[in-house]
Amino acid sequence: LQDFKLEFGHHQGRTSSVWHGGTATIAQSPGDEVWGIVWKMNTCNLSSLDKQEGVEDGIYVPIEVNVHTQAGKVLTCRSYQMKDYVSGPPSPQYKKVICMGAKQNGLPTDYQEKLEAIETNNYAGPVPIMEEIEAAIKAEKINSA
C-alpha cells in the first residue's frame, strides 16, 4: 500500500481493553508504504468483517485503497482506518501478533525488521486473546506433527 504508513493509536484516547495498548491503523503519508496480505472475499461477508473491525462501534471506518502487488497489478481493496484516535504504542503482545503474521505470510524481510523495531508500551499483564492465539498455534503444530 503506497503512500500510507502504519500507525498505532487509542480510539478517542481510550486504551484497547482487549490488547492493552494502541491498535493498528493506516494514515496517508507520501513516500511511505505498508505491506500486508490481500484476501479475496465474497461481498456478502463484508458486514461480518465490518463488525469484527469495529465499524458499527464507530472505531474504524472502511476505506478503499489501491494496492500494488508484487506482480505489478493494482487492486482496489477495502481497508480500515481508525477514527478520532490519539497516537500510542501497542502492547508487546499486539506487536507480536503483527510480527508473527508478517513472518507467516512472507512479507519482505526489511519490512519485518521495521515491524520488530516498533516501540511498545511494555504492558506485562494478562492478554487473554493472546493466550487463545498461542494455544491455537500450539494445537495446530501438534495436529500437523
Image (spheres, helix red, strand yellow):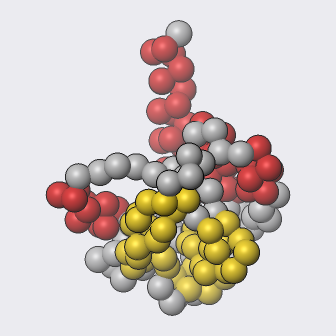
Which residue is depicted at the point 79% across and 65% down?
119
In the image, is residue 47 above or below residue 132? below
Residue 127 x, y percent position in the rendering: 56, 54
Q: Is residue 12 above or below residue 42?
A: below
Left or right: 56, with 116 as reference point:
left
Residue 33 position within the rendered picture, expressed as x and y whole percent measured from the top left: 67, 66
Q: In this view of the protein, which residue sits in the foreground, 132 or 140?
A: 140
Q: Residue at x 46, y 51 (%)?
A: 38
Residue 8 in sight from this viewpoint: no
Name the residue at 22% across, 59% down. 43
Q: Position of residue 102 (x, y in %)?
A: 63, 46
Outermost residue toward the top in this view: 145
Is residue 64 or residue 50 the one in the foreground? 64
Q: Residue at x 45, y 15 (%)?
A: 143
Quadrant where the N terminus is found in the figure:
bottom right
| Side (left or right) of 62 relative to 69 | left
Note whether 35 is above or below 17 in the view shown.
above
Compared across the picture, whether 114 is left or right of 60 comes to right
Labels in figure, total: 0
Q: Position of residue 95 (x, y in %)?
A: 67, 56
Q: Residue furthest front?
A: 72
Q: Quadrant of residue 108?
A: top right
Using the image as rendered, state which of residue 120 and residue 83 is in the foreground. 83
Q: Residue furthest left?
A: 44
Give the quadrant of residue 24.
bottom right
- Judge whether 144 appears above or below 125 on screen: above
